[in-house]
Image (cartoon, rainbow, N blue to C red):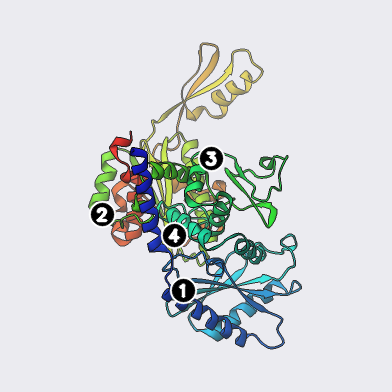
Amino acid sequence: MQEKKETRKLGKVIEEAKKRIVPDKEETRKVNDFVQTILSRIKEKIAEEEPIKPLLVGSIAKNTWIRGDRDIDIFLLFPPETKREDLKAKTLAIGRKITRNVMERFAEHPYVRMFINEFQVDLVPCYKVNSSLEIKSSVDRTPFHVEYVKKKTNEEVKNEIRLLKQFMKGINVYGAEAKVGGFSGYLCELLIIHAGSFIDLLRKATRWRRKQVIDIEGYYRGKDPTKIFQEPLIVVDPVDPLRNAAAAVTTQKMYEFISASSFFLENPSINFFFPPKEKTPTTNTVIDLMKNRETSFIFIVYKSHFNVSPEILHPQLKKTTEAMAKLLTSHDFEILDKTYWTNELDTAIFIIELQTKRVPLIKKHVGPKIGMKNQENFLKKYLVEKREEVISGPYIENERWIVCLKRKFTEATELLNHYLTLEKQELGLPPLIKKAESFKVLLNTEIKELMDQFNGFRLSLTRYLKRKPSWLQYIHESSF
């Protein structure tokens, strides 16, 4: 009886979600009319002698878009012999002929973003090739992706895809961009094609493990694709067996999806699809959360006009976070966790939480065993070459030589300031950070002014401090 009740509840939640995400006839007509209009305008602006063809791609082309989406993706198919610099110049020229509200963006190669009425239109150049195995850039596969999904789906399957996309948005694992590291729209489509329905996909996902392999077309039947692909989730691209369509999915996002799938099946709630809007806390509330942890927070604030796409910016910020954490760890500071935030325009803030901001002046250094070949070098080093650093020793403890050394840096802020000012080359910082206009290292509540200035940073820091996935609040106590 209880099982039937839960099944009915699950069905009701699914039906409610569908009502909210499937576009109605009026919205569908409006989007389709705009698409036809913009395609006609693009064709008009392409010079007669140019062998360029516009092609609608993305979720609109596959009819897997969610109600309210206003993002239109149109590819300009160029002959394979076109020079890369011409792709950029001609695409930008066509965009400017259509609207003045144009932004030039950069991914693997430049593209144009246009804002027309309530629609965002990305105009992306690619090469027209006969096979996905002949591609010259990664976007050249996209037309083949569209063709495959359209061939493999009907209206019922498309609505199941919409459910999965909205579910992933609700649990914050949707988006293959670098700052998310989650599931792309195309990957969602493949997962539903593989499983057949949204619920069946969730049930399968609860049994996923690291190095999970999904090979819809059976390209690797009798073979082991994990020898080729190293990512935690492997979904062989049906149009290119040498590509993992899930390559962007991080281990973190994979396991968040696995867990959320399990809990949703046990505790169905519309809030998994549409979580309540988060309230941005006050600065004082966030400061109190920090103080209650009794740890030390280091904030490294960079100011610079980044002037690059998020896909270029975020990997460099992640690399910088790792470099700073590695520096602190190498000097014996114990890191609890680390992250970063950026407004993607002119400010990046690296956040490192330490057990303590200070380490003792003395560091115990264990040397070689008594009588070993390197004993002489050890004694020479600390009796002669570096004796100023030695506070006690060398002495023998059990079977080894020991010295107690004086640390050069005992404060985390002092260490970071020194290296970021005088020895930044040793840190291996990426180009954007090396070229930054200014930086400062702040400790704990010294970040208060920037919290007041950036609501997004305040909300991001709050999420870090709380860390609990939003969907856990929908789980009933009786489930445990």
Q: Looking at the image, can residue 435 be seen? A: no
Q: Nearer the viewer, residue 452 or 48?
A: 48
Element at label 4: strand
Number of callouts: 4
Amino acid on which the number 2 mark rests in the picture: Thr
Crowding near the residue tagged with mark 3, few <14, some 14–19, many ≥20 C-alpha atoms within 10 Å: some
- Nearer the N terminus, badge 1 or badge 4? 1
Quarter of the figure with the C terminus:
top left
Marks 2 and 3, how far apart at CA: 40 Å
Report the residue at 74% width, 63% height from top.
131
- The residue singled out by tag 3 in the image is 208
| Type of amino acid at the residue the image marks with label 1 | Thr
Alpha carbon of mark 4 to alpha carbon of mark 2: how far? 24 Å
> What numbered label is drawn on residue 283?
2
Left or right: 136 in relation to 101: right
* Mark 3 vs mark 4: in front: 3
Measured from the top left, where is residue 100 in percent x and y? 49, 84
Where is the N terminus found, in terms of image quarters? top left
**Foreground tag (1 vs 2):** 1
Residue at (30% x, 51% y) in the render: 446
Q: CA distance from mark 1 to mark 2?
A: 43 Å
Disc nearest the viewer among 2 and 3: 3
Q: Is residue 322 visible?
A: yes
